[in-house]
Amino acid sequence: MNVRKSSFWHNLKQSKYLYLMSLPFVAWVFVFSYLPLWGWTMAFQKYKPAKSFFEQDWVGFYYFKELFHDDMFIQVLRNTIAMSVMGLIAGFTIPIIFAILLNELRQQLFKRFVQTISYLPHFVSWIVAAGIVTKMLSTDNGAVNELLLSLHIINEPIQFMAKGNLFWGIVTASDVWKETGWNTIIYLAAIAGIGPELYEAARVDGASRLQQVWHITLPGIRSTIIILIIISIGHLISIGFEKQFLLGNNLVRDYSQTLDLYALNYGLGTGRYSFGTAINIFNSVVSVFLLFTANGIFKKITKESII
Amino acid sequence: MRARSLSGSGTPWSDRIFDVVVYVAVIFVTICTLYPFLNVLALSLNDSTDSVRGGITIFPREFTLKNYSTIFAFSGLITGLKISILRTIVGTLLGLLSASMLAFTLSRVDFQGRKFVSTFLALTMYVSGGLIPFYVLIKDLHMMGTFAVYVLPGLVSAFNVFVIRSFIDGIPYALQESAKLDGANDFTIYWRVILPLTKPALATIALFLAVGQWNSWFDTYLYNGSKDHLTTLQYELMKVIQSTTTNVDNFRGRNMVEVMAQISPESVKMAITIIVTVPILIVYPFLQRYFVKGMTLGAVKS
């Protein structure tokens, strides 16, 4: 015991700089990432900011019951899942297709140019992106309406931003516009890892380029796709609120409100912290559940795990 | 690079059609990506009363710099610019320092706290307290209405730490050992040996941090919305953009609207959008090879 203890102190002294360099940041993470979890207690109290923790009234699951009986909750959950699933499908298929297209380009200089352009929207803020999308879709001189009018597909401009049933599509399309180029990076890296001898052999066998894509490129990036899908499923209901906040307006509120936006508007906006926290907890718990479920299924299929 | 049969005669017609489809699709995507930016640029440089007539595509019809000179006369924009630059510099430096230090300690096999720190960090990627508890925490820490709220809460990012760590893992350990034999302590090893060798990874992370800082607006909206001296460029842009959409309930702007009354709000929006975007445009293409590598590295590890 004595020996072990002294070796512990010895080690502590030996790596004192390592402790000094990490522990302050660990404390930091504790404050800003773990202390908010302590804030979850608010959901079980009738939280009043002026009172201390011990003076709060405990109400059990009262706010959760209220949340689940709220008509708006169902609507918000529907919006969240709809936009999430649409984003998941579009956000996977389109970057994969674009990565394959890029990979098939023969001029390297042109490929480099296209890639650089395609990363640009990723780096601008959602405020800029939302401003651009609103401008492009606007009824006075918006590019999309002008194009559709000049092609005689429509006779008068469509009020894109005022139609609730178009909102999910607009959010999904904006996301595709902003992130497709960026999301190809990982697939292009995976494609680059496929052995050239496979393509060589396929060519000898007389496979066309399309057949090569189907039988070599796609199977070659299969595991990358699966891993990324698992990660995305974990984030399925935490799609945030940024896009919806910036692109939405009162006219489309029934379609634009997500869980986080709901917590922001009805929790913070009206000072109902306990109710808002209950929404946040619901969100986090479902996310973790989804992540573990997805990981479990993934483990069964591939004998690999990401956690 | 794969050598393909480039001569036309040997290529089957199906492959030629394939090539045409590929090029048409890629060019279409490139136009869709680039056109909105060029359109906004043209509108920002066009006379605002002329713009209302419509028909501006990628070239200004009546060139003017008046839109820009008008918005620069607005003091909120100058303050916003200052604060945005300041938070980008401070936030990036602090973020780099914390991520690289933590990454260094985590890469050391002889560090006993390694497992604990690593798990402690990794968990933050999966569980978060949520918006409201975080807001209450910031309030309880008396960080509302301060500059600190821009740079301190997001100081440590687990993702950044793991990206840098996987890079450090690739540096031969013998370098650290020989430095140790020369009597260097762990901090000196970090500062003199590891940091200079980690530059490519640091460049990637610096870009991510800087872009994140430059682009953030929600912290300003939430914590400093009423503090005019702490406003950011993105927040000013948000106020202008939201003011003319129907989202009036979120609108808290004041002076900018009066400025906008003088010239068409559309042109003002376009000019600010360009001002906010230009710094990013200048930086990211030069760091492209670094962040492509960094992204790949980070994704493989996580």
Image (cartoon, coloured by chain):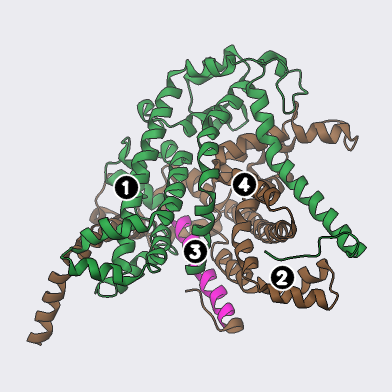
Indicate yes or no whether the magenta region holds residue A292. yes
Q: Residue at x 59, y 51 (%)?
A: A72
Chain of the residue on which disc 1 is drawn: B
Residue occupied by mark 2: A218
Q: Amino acid at mark 4?
A: Thr
Dominant secondary structure, magenta? helix
Residue occupied by mark 3: B297
Q: Residue at x 29, y 75 (%)?
A: B109
Q: Is residue B183 shown above or below A178?
A: below
Q: Is residue A185 shown above or below A159?
A: below
Q: Amino acid at mark 1?
A: Leu
Label number found at residue A116: 4
Crowd band around label 4 with a 10 angstrom C-alpha radius: few (<14), some (14–19), many (20+): some
Indicate yes or no whether the magenta region holds residue A166. no
**Mark-to-mark CA distance, 1 and 4:** 28 Å
Q: Quadrant of the N terminus of chain A?
A: bottom left
Label number found at residue B94: 1
Q: Which chain is green?
A: B
Q: Which residues are magenta?
A: A276-299
Q: Earlier in the sequence, mark 4 or mark 2?
A: 4
Write down the colour of chain A.
Answer: brown
* x, y percent for residue A200: 75, 74
Label number found at residue B199: none
* x, y percent for residue B46: 67, 18
Seen from the viewer's position, the closer of residues A220 and B154 is A220
**Mark-to-mark CA distance, 2 and 3:** 21 Å
